[in-house]
Image: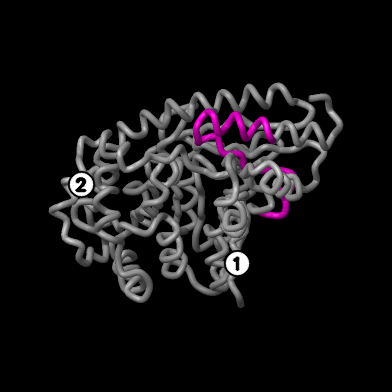
Amino acid sequence: MDIAVARLEAWMRSYYHNVDHDVGSSGVRDLSIADLLAISGAGLSDLNALTIRDSETYGGSGLRSALADRWTGGDVDPVMVTHGSSEAIYLVMHLAVGRGDEIVVVDPAYQQLYDVARWRGCRITPWPLRAAEGFRVDLPRLWELARTRPRMIVVNFPHNPTGVSITPAEQDEIIAIAREAGAWLVWDNAFGEMTYTGASLPLPHGRYEKTVCFGTLSKSYGLAGLRVGWCLAPPDLLARAAILRDHIALYVSPVLEFFAELAVRNADRILKLQHEHASANRRRLLDWAATMPDSVRVAPPDGGVTAFVEFLGYPDVTDLCRELAERYRVLLVPGSCFGDAFASYARLGFGGTAAELFAGLSAVEELVRARTGMPA
């Protein structure tokens, strides 16, 4: 069985580096090395002492300790540094589940959260968010799905691509559902530190023994190019992951870990700057959508820097997104990258600069008006 094409990555491969304005990506504005050094108070001279040698399988001691201080009260045993959260996903889906296992996955979802497991012969059961209610969670439905005692439940809040999140009480209930089913609970925390309508949710790590948490510096930090993420999991699962990654990537480069440790140690400063910027752009997006009520519908994102925009009257927005990229040089991601049922949606990222968001929204509006014959 061949692994499925990663639709989102394939779309990005075609257009990400061939546009002038990006309103499709899911991260905040990119930081430069100079930005990171200024925020952290470090200098390039600090690199002089770095020996470019092998790092450690679980992550260099400095970065691993920084992550532990932030997430586990200083306990490094459940912490592994990974190449983005994508490596963490790949490792866990090879080790915590096997052929024939059922996995319940929030729907829509980032494709790698389920198709790696599908490729390995797992049965994927979608847990649909309620699209008619702004993609809100349906916990009674999750209770029903968990009656079959699935091997794993995979969730992502704040959610990619819709930006919807949940309350602490709803999080508690999800943990209770996983515990009742005896299922692994996989908590994708990619956007967990970027919220607007409430405080960030605590990680479920430490509250249920069969929990795995993923995180990354790509989304809320603006450091996607570092390709550094992390995995929190029971030490026995990480020990097996160490054996598997011996056949893949071995470890993360100590050069990347140097900059990643600066970011984690100064996370609150970075996130404050990025949050102020993203909040302003979120308002700009919602104000724009309010001027086009007959063309687009947007549920206000609770967190992250993406919204799932429904294009009214478009059964499939793929051609519209392709024309935006090829004619207007603007990146927008068709909803079909998250499943065929979402073809009338597009993921719109508002994490870039204000100028980039303005240019992207202007192009989207111009194209929609031209296609529908609406006056400019």
Q: Which is nearer the eye, 264 or 352? A: 352
Disc 1 packing (10 Å; few <14; some 14–19; many ≥20): many
**Could you tell me which quadrant the C terminus lies in?**
top right
Q: Which residue is mark 2?
A: 74
Q: Is residue 344 magenta?
A: yes
Q: Is residue 110 left or right of residue 71?
A: right
Q: Residue at x 47, y 58 (%)?
A: 183
Q: Which is nearer the eye, 103 or 147? A: 103
Up-down relation of residue 194 to residue 260 (above or below): above
Secondary structure category for the residue under label 2: loop
Q: Is residue 214 magenta?
A: no
Mark 1: amino acid? Arg
Up-down relation of residue 355 to residue 101 (above or below): above
Mark 2: amino acid? Gly
Q: How is the image coloured?
A: one colour
**Could you tell me which quadrant the N terminus lies in?**
bottom right
Q: Residue at x 23, y 64 (%)?
A: 56
Q: Position of residue 52 (x, y in %)?
A: 20, 62
Region in magenta: 339-363
Q: Residue at x 39, y 49 (%)?
A: 215
Residue 54 position by quadrant:
bottom left
Up-down relation of residue 335 to residue 368 (above or below): below
Q: Is residue 134 left or right of residue 44?
A: right
Q: Is residue 298 left or right of residue 9?
A: right
Up-down relation of residue 286 to residue 316 (above or below): above
Q: Which is nearer the eye, 164 or 329? A: 329
The label number, if any, that marks residue 123 in the structure image: 1
Secondary structure category for the residue under label 1: strand
From this viewpoint, which residue is outermost toward the left? Answer: 49
